[in-house]
């Protein structure tokens, strides 16, 4: 099932190629495999309003997963034992049920990933987050646009870089991000402008060298993620006159070898209301799972989702451009 995004004019329409047609050119079809990861978006409230944010999160958003929906999510986890539960937002820590959710998920044996923006640690009542993460063996994935202040603050807001470095140091102090350690601290790099990320291995080496030399900060891995032309980043593309060029760039960089590793094949996404999606990007475009499937986490049945048809759109070219892109970095 393919969906098309609205375009601005005929030139933009020429750049909007049907993703499923592109797959078919290479003899490919995008279908799900066994679901290993449940990605839970607990709401859009965030202490930041980053320019690239595909969630359009900010301090003014009021969408928050209730305890009732959290318990429905936990019911599914208890019954079906997902290998990994990936908790995101907004800043997920701002959800009043966040710590309850993490503790319950861990008690049932699932690995927990938290998409942590670092600066939320300085919000009221959050200073003990590093210790909470440590005690529950949470894997942390944090966005850091660059190892220099100007580039980071340009994307995430003034003062964010300084607080991020302070937070990284605190996490290092309790054992996160150490070579050979069990406490995983991974960073995410999103390009600041309308271009594709560089080689993940090369920029990871740059980040590790510069963060260690300049700030005495360590981390485990760097993931490069392509900016998707949706929500706030799409608004930036349109304001800067880069939408058509960026869409064409994504299509031209299509890599069929990235398709087998796409995150949507082994992941299902649930939003703050309990509705199901093939990925977090589809969630932000209100593209629910295929209509023949259960639509709510309350009706989750893993057997129904094996080999499912995955809903696609032009934004999917972002996940297959170059070395590919997923919540865990490159895939090809």
Image (cartoon, rainbow, N blue to C red):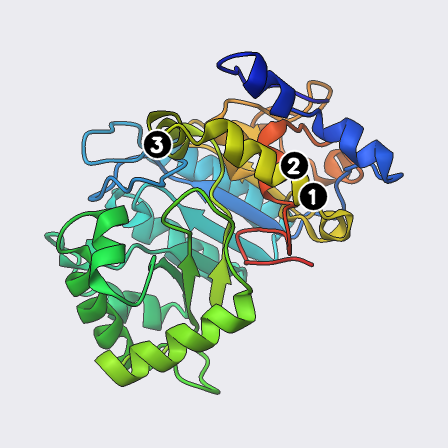
Q: Kindly identify which numbered label has been placed on residue 77.
A: none
Picture residue at 39% right of the left edge, 78% below the top:
208
Quarter of the image that includes the C terminus: bottom right
Q: Earlier in the sequence, mark 1 or mark 3?
A: 3
Picture residue at 62% right of the left edge, 36% below the top:
316
- Secondary structure of the residue carrying numbered label 3: helix
Q: Earlier in the sequence, mark 3 or mark 2?
A: 3
**Horizontal relation, residue 276 to residue 93: left or right:** right
- Secondary structure of the residue carrying numbered label 1: loop
Question: Distance of mark 1 from mark 3, alpha carbons?
Answer: 23 Å
Residue closer to the observer: 255 or 114: 255
Q: Are marks 3 and 2 in contact (CB under 8 Å)?
A: no
Question: Distance of mark 1 from mark 2, alpha carbons?
Answer: 5 Å
Picture residue at 56% right of the left edge, 46% below the top:
38
Residue closer to the observer: 235 or 311: 235
- Secondary structure of the residue carrying numbered label 2: helix
Question: Distance of mark 3 from mark 2, alpha carbons?
Answer: 19 Å
> On the image, numbered disc 1 is attached to which residue?
254
> On the image, numbered disc 3 is attached to which residue?
236
> On the image, numbered disc 2 is attached to which residue?
251
**Horizontal relation, residue 166 to residue 202: left or right:** left
């Amino acid at each position: 099932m393919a969906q098309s995004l609205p375009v601005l004019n005929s030139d933009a329409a020429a750049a909007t190629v049907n993703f499923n047609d592109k797959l078919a050119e290479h003899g490919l079809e995008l279908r799900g495999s066994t679901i290993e990861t449940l990605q839970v978006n607990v709401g859009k409230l965030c202490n930041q309003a980053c320019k690239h944010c595909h969630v359009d999160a900010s301090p003014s958003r009021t969408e928050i997963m209730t305890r009732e929906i959290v318990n429905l999510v936990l019911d599914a986890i208890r019954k079906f034992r997902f290998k990994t539960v990936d908790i995101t937002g907004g800043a997920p820590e701002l959800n009043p049920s966040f710590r309850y959710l993490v503790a319950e998920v861990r008690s049932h044996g699932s690995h927990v990933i938290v998409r942590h923006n670092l600066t939320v640690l300085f919000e009221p009542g959050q200073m003990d987050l590093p210790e909470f993460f440590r005690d529950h063996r949470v894997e942390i994935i944090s966005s850091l646009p660059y190892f220099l202040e100007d580039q980071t603050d340009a994307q995430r807001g003034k003062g964010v870089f300084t607080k991020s470095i302070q937070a990284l140091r605190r996490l290092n102090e309790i054992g996160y991000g150490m070579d050979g350690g069990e406490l995983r601290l991974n960073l995410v790099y999103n390009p600041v402008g309308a271009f594709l990320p560089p080689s993940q291995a090369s920029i990871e080496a740059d980040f590790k060298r510069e963060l260690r030399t300049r700030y005495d900060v360590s981390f485990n891995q760097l993931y490069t993620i392509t900016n998707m032309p949706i929500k706030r980043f799409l608004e930036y593309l349109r304001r800067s006159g880069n939408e058509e060029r960026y869409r064409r760039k994504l299509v031209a960089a299509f890599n069929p070898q990235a398709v087998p590793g796409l995150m949507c094949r082994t992941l299902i996404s649930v939003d703050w209301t309990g509705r199901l999606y093939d990925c977090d990007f589809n969630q932000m475009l209100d593209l629910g799972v295929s209509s023949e499937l259960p639509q709510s986490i309350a009706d989750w049945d893993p057997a129904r989702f094996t080999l499912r048809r995955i809903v696609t759109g032009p934004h999917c070219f972002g996940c297959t451009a170059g070395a590919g892109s997923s919540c865990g970095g490159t895939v090809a």
